Image (tube, coloured by chain):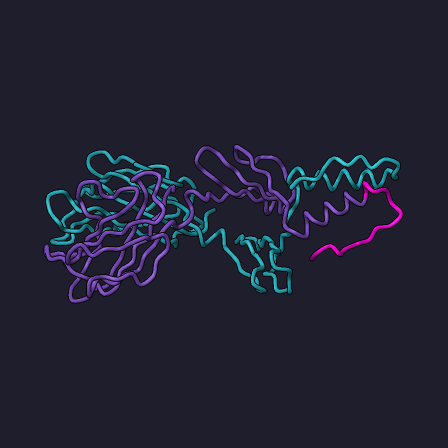
Chain colours: A cyan, B purple
Amino acid sequence: MKLDEYELKGVSQELSDFRDDVTSVVNFGKYSHQVVSLAPTWKAENGETVFFFNGNETRYYYYINDKWNDLSFSTQLLTSWVVFSGTGTPIILDSFGVKSVTVFGVGDYEITWSTAFSNNLYGISATAMERPSDRNPAFVRFVDTANNPSRTAVRVQVRQHFAAAPSDPPYMCLIASGPQS
Amino acid sequence: MKIDDYDIKGVPAEIKRFAEDITILLNNGKYSHPVIPSNPSWNANNGELVLVRAGSSTRIGFFVSNTWNLVDFSSQVVRAWITFSGTNGGAILSSVNVSSFTRDREGEFTIVWANSFATTNYAVSGICNDSGGFIRVGIMNTANNPTSQSLRIRCDKGTGQDADPTIASVIATGVI
């Protein structure tokens, strides 16, 4: 809904200015939500929302069903994900927040993030497709090398479940979540 | 907070209507955030919020700590997930955006999404328990898998022997 253009003839200049301010805020999206540094605890009207920022984390609080609920933008969203083909030169099929995928050896890939995480302790999960020649599910592990995962990249290796031989997956997915710098 | 029902007397009718409009707008949640075609870059007030519609991507932009922050609704939310049991014919224990789940044969399962993905290139990840063996979850290498509508997975003990886990989970994300 937008406010109509009220002329308000014959009123004081201050009231005209008030009309202009209200119309600008409402009609041009200039309404600013509250930003608080402590989680809200007051009894609010259902539908009230505030942003929370404490220097490290940003959350969105919304009052529904007579209680405050919140969503952390820093920790409750998927930060990055990639789908790629690992046979031959890796080909990124789709991704979000991923700068590159580099191959180091058979089934051995480094995924570099577009934006670094705040530290190296972020959530990562991955699943790969089995090879076409057998029905042996592949599993994905962290490569046991120094500084892995790092804030800027993670190195993983795909191996076959049976005998654990390294393997290039035709289709591979990796998901990461955590606070970023 | 809501605006009270003020009876403003002695003012022109236009002012009354202006006040009524503001009251309706604020008391009934009719405020509309701006919808813009590209990421915001202007210097805003902390707490300002905009929606961005750029191509197929929808984002929310909010200005906090003197910086524009963005959340991509198309790529940063979990689109679907399922926790299921593979034993006794298979059963969904809980799920979001899953229309059906089928145990095709021992260790092989098909998950059908309630809302299809935009392409076949969405990210999935799965895990299961070791019920009677050391079981892994993998994406089946079979024609047309995954599709935008469904995903086929295999649970296997690693010796070529498929197995039904008593509990397994798969999550999926991507553009819908």
Q: Nearer the viewer, residue B59 or B3?
A: B3
**Residue furthest out toward the front:** B13
**Left-right relation of B172 to A11:** left
- Depicted B129 relative to depicted A89: above or below: below
Quarter of the image where the N terminus of chain A is located: top right
The location of residue B120, given as percent across then percent down, is 29, 40
The location of residue A146, given as percent across then percent down, is 30, 50
**Left-right relation of A133 to B168:** left
- Asked if the magenta segment contains residue B9, the reply would be yes
Which residues fall within the magenta stretch?
Answer: B1-15
Q: Nearer the viewer, residue A155 or A89?
A: A89
Q: How many marks?
A: 0
Tell me the quarter of the picture where residue A108 sits.
top left
Residue at the spot 20% in from the left edge and 64% down from the top edge: B87
Q: Nearer the viewer, residue A84 or B131?
A: B131
The location of residue A15, given as percent across then percent down, is 83, 41
**Left-right relation of A172 to B142:** right
Dominant secondary structure of the magenta stretch? loop
- Asked if the magenta segment contains residue A120, the reply would be no
Residue at the spot 62% in from the left edge and 44% down from the top edge: B48
**Left-right relation of A35 to B142:** right
Tell me the quarter of the picture where residue B136 sits.
bottom left
The location of residue B42, given as percent across then percent down, is 61, 35
